[in-house]
Image (tube, rainbow, N blue to C red):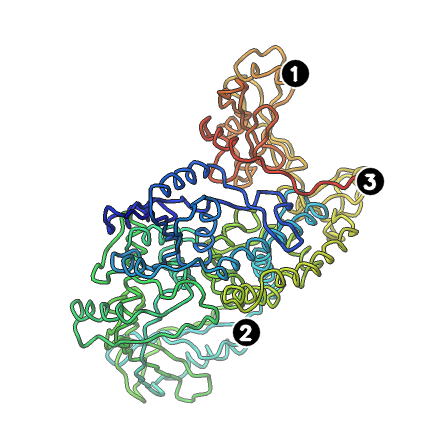
Amino acid sequence: MTKLLIVESPAKAKTIGKYLGSEYKVVASVGHVRDLPKSNKKAINLDGFVPHYEVSAGKEKILHEIGKLAKKSDEVLLATDPDREGEAIAWHIKEAVDFGRKPVQRVVFHEITKDAVMEALEHPRDIDENLRRAQEARRVLDRLVGYDLSGIIWKKVRYGLSAGRVQSPALRILVEREREIKAFKPERYFTITAETKTSKKAELPLVCSVEPAVEREAERIVVVGKREPWNVVSVEETEARRSPRAPFTTSTLQQTASTRLGFSPSRTMRVAQKLYEAGLITYMRTDSTTISKQAIGQIAGAIEKTFGRELVLVRVFTTKSKNAQEAHEAIRPTNVFTRIAGHTPEEKKLYSLIWARTTASQMKDARVMRTKILANTTSRSIPDFQANGSRTIFQGWLEADPDARGEDVELPKVAQDDKLELINISALEKFTEPPSRYSEAGLVRELEKRGIGRPSTYASIIKTLEDREYVTKENRNLRPTDTGEVVSGFLEDNFGKYISDTFTAEMEDKLDYIAEGKIGYEKTLSDFYKPFGRDVKSKEKLAKATTLGSADPKMKCPKCNGVMIIKLGRSGKFLSCSKYPDCDGSLLIDGTETPKDKIIGIHPNTGREITLKNGKYGPYVEMVMSEEIKNEETKKSKKSKKQKLRRASVPKEIKPEEVTLDQAVHFLSLPRELGQHPETGKIISGNIGRFGPYIVHDGDFRSLKKPDDVYSIDLNRAMEILKEPKKKRSFTRRKKE
């Protein structure tokens, strides 16, 4: 009897194939096999919210192979991942392949080990329709919201912008913090420090317990401190315990990998996926902090062997998330006796992090002695000065996770009333700082706290915001761009309810209820979409947001001295004359003049000047061409021979004033001929246009998304993109009746 076992990835198939006998054939679907048509709202029939699925590009061959193998098998087992997404993939495979009357069942395991796989094969089940429907509801809901909101933004703000059910609330959180930072008014205060020595000449630095806001008070404290003798007021020592943290969930793994390893959430999940598929860790998408009894026994044995029996303390962690609906265990090593694992340096780093957190979770508390010394002058007419120290007196779980320890601060031994020698005392003027921007780890923590999204979506939320250029990274913090602020402001003003914390979190709960079978798919979507659709339609009459408000009255048009207004351009906000188009005067957003044209140098091939200019869509380089020049760059087409100018945008990540001649020549290498299409014989070329980089063949334009680069993309990759289904514009103007 032969059995066909279907999983998502080739790596997962390879690992599982090692555990099973010759009666099993393990194949991979390579992810999703069907999806909604791209850029086409008609993919969903609003009468019942019935989605219309299409086989994903390149998956026809895979499905055909699965069908052929199924005919040779007696039974089909769908072993995709143990969550909603995995359940949906299993269902799509079953729907897309004609398995005839062969039994098709679902098997689920949360770690790819031989024991777990064999146990799962003993307990096959039917596809969980509730779980599958919950994933479908999320997919349909995200499509409807994304297309409706994006459509209105295209019309009212700027073409090419987008919004989403979960990405927009996340953007709002970042923009709200940015507004707090801009509105923040720093307040002056003074920190006062005293350098002292004990009777045994040991250094004891002290800090004033009060930070005066008034300079006169700070000066008084310094004067008294210099004038009078010092002594120790009190010494207080207290023992504190540090308990280990719970094993990793998806969210806490992303946060800790960000702070300790510098990994982005998407990178963390990509590396964790590889560790899971190699059978090294349990499933990495989970809300649960639970560890199975069998695993706890193994962990206790590993601790006893590595650190000693006296450090073992079995703990049971309860899951705080009210919707721990993904896998049923925390993320842990499948074999905790293996301390180092993984093929690449980043895999080894992440595995070590997971190993340390898992092992530490079943160990005794660390004990820390904390010391607080108070000192003052003999008159005690000024606030107390203090020194705080700590030292670890029992390592406990820190033996397994030493990176969590922090540094000990040892203080010299002193007793109450001991005299101190003042070496120096001084006051330093400081100003209060605005709240800090969210890091990626901080945003994940905030999204989880507010109930926005689910662990499996956090990485994609942040990546989408970065890809859309709504946020940029500055010193590992996320800062909204001008475009991000404008989009968020428009949504807050017009669709505030739908991107609020409460509404978004409640919708997540409803999707969880569908998975639990508590509420129905159609009613949930209908209850949401009917009022939402009406609200979107009511905004059709809004005037186009051509301006973002008035500029500071002090800012005057450099050409006519008229009033300036704020507008949004390709490179962000700028000031435009309110009389435009009659007057084209403009300034940068800070009120400085728009950079004037600048000659960068001479093109080494053409001998022509290259000039840096600033236009409607941002800075660009320009080279004057001549009809008489007959080199390779002008032979590309009849059109190019007639062109008098060649222009290329300066990438947003490069400051215009820093553009070099070599870079300008590089930019002007566009358009690039990639080669001839093997079927039509026509040229495929790459270029950058108003809406970003693209390739084109015989009038068929395709946008390029990262990591594809218009300057380096080759013919083979261009052919792959051209073979993909053409993305259709879903927002067309209505014909007048």
Measured from the top left, where is residue 12 in percent x and y?
A: 33, 49
Say which of 37 and 258 sits in front: 37
Other-residue count near label 1 (Cα within 10 Å), few / some / many at <14 / 14–19 / ≥20: few
Say which of 730 and 421 sits in front: 730
Q: Quadrant of the C terminus?
A: top right
Q: Check disc 3 and give the amino acid type.
A: Lys
Residue bearing the label numbered 1? 642
Measured from the top left, where is residue 41 in percent x and y?
A: 64, 46
What residue sits 56% from the left and 14% below the top? 635
Q: CA distance from mark 2 to mark 3?
A: 71 Å
Residue 537 appears left or right of 621: right
Q: Check disc 2 and give the amino acid type.
A: Glu
Q: CA distance from mark 2 to mark 1?
A: 72 Å
Residue bearing the label numbered 3? 736
Q: Earlier in the sequence, mark 2 or mark 1?
A: 2
Residue bearing the label numbered 2? 215
Other-residue count near label 2 (Cα within 10 Å), few / some / many at <14 / 14–19 / ≥20: some
Q: Earlier in the sequence, mark 1 or mark 3?
A: 1
**Tag in front: 2 or 1:** 1
Q: Quadrant of residue 521?
A: bottom right
Say which of 112 and 263 sits in front: 112
Q: Quadrant of residue 81?
A: bottom left
**Element type where label 3 sits in the image:** loop
**Element type where label 1 sits in the image:** helix
Residue 617 appears left or right of 545: left
**Tag in front: 1 or 3:** 3
What residue sits 20% from the left and 62% below the top? 337
